[in-house]
Image: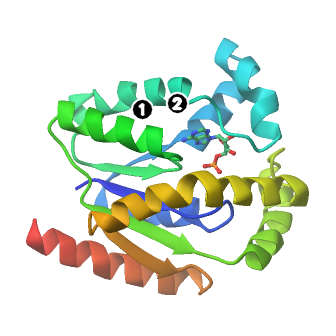
Amino acid sequence: MNIIIFGPPGAGKGTQSDFIVKKYNLLQVSTGKILRDEIKNKTNLGQKISSLMSAGSLVEDKIVNKLIEEIVSNRNNENRFIFDGYPRNLDQASNLDNLLKKYEQKINIVLKLSVSLNTIKTRISERRYVEKRPDDNEEVAIRRYETYEKSTEPVIEYYKKLNLLKVINGERPIDQINKEISGIIDTLQAWL
Ligand code: AMP
């Protein structure tokens, strides 16, 4: 089973992915986390992308696609992915399609956490003090939200047309969202 989870920054993708990963023994592929680790570890790549990320802009497709291929090509990970933060635009979606085909896999379900910009602003300002992410301030959050709407919403439409999309109201308490997601995955597993 391979899953993609979408949602604007601050929608709770990370929290929900953590829950799904533990419950269903999946492997979380969070490009945001991988890229932040590159910065933390002061690698060459980290130095290259640091200012882009702080400004809330997307990192080049070529870089992110390469990271994803390294993970998808590892047969030990087969059919247990939850992609969180990838694909972010249509080119990345097409790259993921090709990669999954190449490694004889597919996406089984796409979850979208739907949250308003107002809620996002509140959550980001709270998270800022906990996670200390340089891209968690209101101005950058708005920019990341706009990038999400412009670049990522078309990707969500793409999966909707493929009948893979489930939209989840992300404004509710975490455990209610957990329950809804579990219901969706349990139903899916019964069919697989
Ligand atoms: P996230 O943790 O998913 O909110 O991502 C944080 C930041 O990492 C984004 O604002 C981008 O700068 C970068 N990033 C994460 N995933 C991608 C991606 N798939 N493509 C390009 N940039 C990404």
Q: Splitting the image into 4 quarters, where does residue 24 fall?
A: bottom left
Q: Is mark 2 within 8 Å of ligand 1?
A: yes
Q: Nearer the viewer, residue 142 or 176?
A: 142
Q: Quadrant of ligand 1?
A: top right
Residue 17 makes an appearance in the image = yes
Residue 141 in the figure: left or right of residue 33: right
Q: Which residue is mark 2?
A: 64
- Quadrant of image for the C terminus: bottom left
Q: Amino acid at mark 2?
A: Val
Q: Nearer the viewer, residue 121 or 101?
A: 101
Q: Residue at x 27, y 34 (%)?
A: 98
Element type where label 1 sits in the image: helix
- Near mark 2 (Cα within 10 A), the count class, few <14, some 14-19 or many ≥20, is some
Are the residues at dot 1 and dot 2 in contact (C-beta closer than 8 Å)? Answer: yes
Asked if 62 appears above or below 119 in the picture, the reply is above
Question: Which disc, if any, is residue 98?
Answer: none
Element type where label 2 sits in the image: helix
Q: Which residue is mark 1?
A: 68
Residue 60 in the figure: left or right of residue 69: right
Residue 23 makes an appearance in the image = no
Q: Spatial distance from mark 1 to mark 2, Cα to Cα? A: 6 Å
Residue at the top extreme, as displayed? 44
Residue 139 in the figure: left or right of residue 26: right
Residue 67 in the figure: left or right of residue 55: left
Q: Position of residue 118 (x, y in %)?
A: 79, 78
Q: Position of residue 12 (x, y in %)?
A: 60, 67
